[in-house]
Image: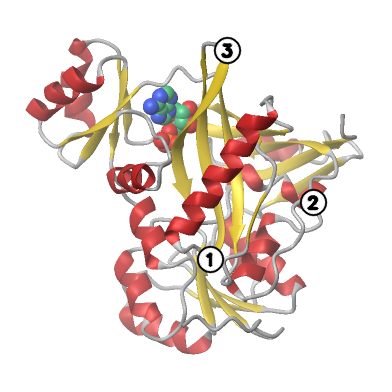
Amino acid sequence: MTDLSPLPPGTRIGILGGGQLGRMLSLAASQLGMRTHIFCPDTESPAFEVTPHKTVASYDDEAALEAFAREVDVVTYEFENVPLGTAAALEKHVPVFPGPKALAVSQDRLAEKAFLTGAGVPVAPHKAVTTRESLDAAIAEVGLPAVLKTTRLGYDGKGQRILRTPADADPAFAEIGGVDLVLEAFIPFEREVSVIVARGKDGSCVTYDVAENVHKNHILKTSTLPAALDAATARAAADAAKTIAAALGYVGVMGVEFFVVENGGRSTLLVNEIAPRVHNSGHWTQAVCVTDQFENHIRAICGWPLGDTTRFADVVMENLIGDEIHAVAETLAPAAQPHVYGKTEARPGRKMGHVNRVTPKK
Ligand code: AMP
């Protein structure tokens, strides 16, 4: 039985991963009087600057994991590719939220699609691909254009190739084959949207408003609220996110990304991906909600009641990528809320910060 009593201020929260999400989780935790301990192999982790405790070790260092587990009361993570063995080793000593099912499902695109389909949530038509021959069979079934993806370890468009004609199959397979793949139908979506959902240990569940997301070079550039979506479709997206969270027995905050497809004047939704963590397309909640996604994640894993997700203003979240971070102060309007992650090197394509630009609700 899960213990439902709220963990008190002073609780020691272990966080696997020291990027900007770990950093913002740590800030939210300290606001509630919790003390974070960040575990990350990278000595230069931006989260290390804002945490009282840290461990620099690799995720398969059993001795370091055991020592870490002894130092904390609950463990969470900021990225979905936490090795399952790491989560399992920690779980012997300390509760880990979200649980192993969410990790296992979100680490493998095929497992994710099977799980979503089983939960009654539609996904793009797809087929598993292991060999060059099975790619031909998948093309025959799924059709072209299509997107060939590695089932594991893909993010920001990495490990993906678009196939427009049969002649694209050879080079695409040569480039990313050799590991398990999935061929997905190319979805001519109208827009991409996402929902941030938070679920407590007691099964209580809240969602934030639907965000409309624009990607540039496969990296999220803006999330805009409100999304250009009719009320019924927005409700359907929120319901799907709640269904997924409940089916996973989820505890914490999760991001669910959708394609919106127009079909004879009607909008339908397909889930592209779920992320068992706080999500970049939920950063806008910091500026226009009483309880942002980071605080709700900490509340959920500590057994606190979930906070209000009402959106009090319109907002556009813009990611600052690479060199864009250098102009953050000069380009700041009064109603803009900057977040700078403190990363030392502004490499091209690297998320360095974001700005939430707030306008009155229309
Ligand atoms: P993913 O890594 O699966 O989130 O894909 C990254 C981006 O590639 C998505 O946000 C879409 O813009 C695009 N994309 C991925 N899969 C498809 C698809 N099946 N059809 C059309 N666009 C896609």
Q: Name the residue under label 1.
A: 251
Q: Where is residue 127 in the image (x, y as percent from the top left)?
A: 23, 32
Q: Mark 2 points at which residue?
A: 289
Q: Is mark 3 within 8 Å of ligand 1?
A: no
Ligand 1 resides in the quarter of the picture at top left
> Which of the two marks, 1 or 3, is nearer to us in this view?
3
Q: Is mark 1 within 8 Å of ligand 1?
A: no
Determine the residue positioned at 72% across, 73% down: 30
Q: Position of residue 34 (x, y in %)?
A: 68, 79
- In the image, taking residue 258 as reference, residue 309 lies left or right, namely right
Q: Within 10 Å of the Cα at label 1, are there few (<14), some (14-19), or many (20+) other Cα atoms?
A: many
Q: Which amino acid does label 2 sit on?
A: Cys
- In the image, taking residue 217 as reference, residue 6 lies left or right, namely right
**Which of the image's four quarters has the C terminus?**
top right
Q: How far apart are marks 3 and 2 (CA)?
A: 32 Å
Determine the residue positioned at 37% across, 29% down: 124
Q: What residue type is labelled 1?
A: Val
> Which of the two marks, 3 or 2, is nearer to us in this view?
3
Q: Position of residue 220 (x, y in %)?
A: 57, 35
For marks 1 and 3 on the same chain, the one whose residue lies earlier in the sequence: 1
